[in-house]
Amino acid sequence: MLENLNELVRENAQDAVVNNSEIPNEHNEAVIEAASGSIFESLKEQVSSGNFSGLADIFNGGNAEGSAVAAQASGSFVDKLSGLGINAETAKNVASSIIPSIIGKLTQKTNDPNDSSFNLQDVLGKLAGGSDGKFDLSDVMGMFNGGNQAPNADGQAEGGGIVDKLKGLFN
């Protein structure tokens, strides 16, 4: 999935990255990888934090601009560009011009039955951390109960899922 996402960024970031005099040519590939990595990490964070309604809004054809995913990915992307020595204003401009657009194109591709570059089930499987790359009920249950965890010294599974986090609210 990440390779396809890199390619999607590469196809859609020509003006904002490659033709941008503020981004040194030797950093073009790193900027493309930073953009795709930031989007992937943001989507993965949304899944792990249980923000399924936000993801559903985006993947059901909603607007990526102004979404939590786009905001988080843009912030991460700006940080990564700063690490490459690109000034903050340029980083913000590049982020605002490509991140929402790329997320929008990603969701279009997952919803297009004639485009096999991204399959929503496979995307969700990668985001949920399914060991087999597929998204199924056990992956969803793992998000809620902390996954298949080895027992601790007391013979109890370690907490860490959404259910365990919710329990802490009522103690």
Image (cartoon, helix red, strand yellow):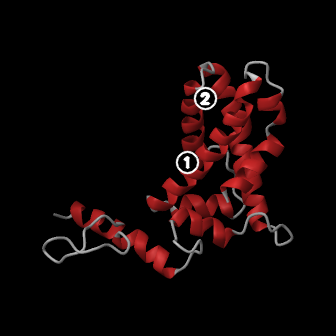
Q: Is residue 25 left or right of residue 46?
A: right
Label 2 environment density (alpha carbons within 10 Å; few <14, some 14–19, many ≥20):
many
The amino acid beneath tag 2 is: Leu
Q: At which x and y percent is residue 52?
A: 53, 64
Q: Is residue 52 above or below residue 26?
A: below
The amino acid beneath tag 1 is: Ala
Q: Is residue 85 left or right of residue 168?
A: right
Task: Please identify the residue farthest to the left as the structure is shown.
Answer: 154
Which residue does the image show at 72% across and 69% down from the upper left? 119
The quarter of the picture where the C terminus appears is bottom left
Q: At which x and y percent is residue 23?
A: 73, 23
State how many labels appear: 2
Residue 81: which disc? 2
Which residue does the image show at 55% across and 49% down from the upper left? 42
Which residue does the image show at 73% across and 19% down from the upper left? 22
Q: At which x and y percent is residue 165?
A: 29, 62
Q: Is residue 168 above or below residue 6?
A: below
Q: Is residue 159 left or right of residue 49?
A: left
Label 1 environment density (alpha carbons within 10 Å; few <14, some 14–19, many ≥20):
some
Residue 110: which disc? none
The quarter of the picture where the N terminus appears is bottom right
Q: At which x and y percent is residue 110?
A: 74, 65
Task: Please identify the residue farthest to the front as the structure is shown.
Answer: 26
Q: Is residue 141 above or below residue 73?
A: below
Reading the image, the residue beneath label 1 is 68
Q: Secondary structure at mark 1?
A: helix
Q: Is residue 108 left or right of residue 99?
A: right
Q: Secondary structure at mark 2?
A: helix
Q: Is residue 39 above or below residue 20?
A: below
Task: Please identify the residue farthest to the right as the structure is shown.
Answer: 114
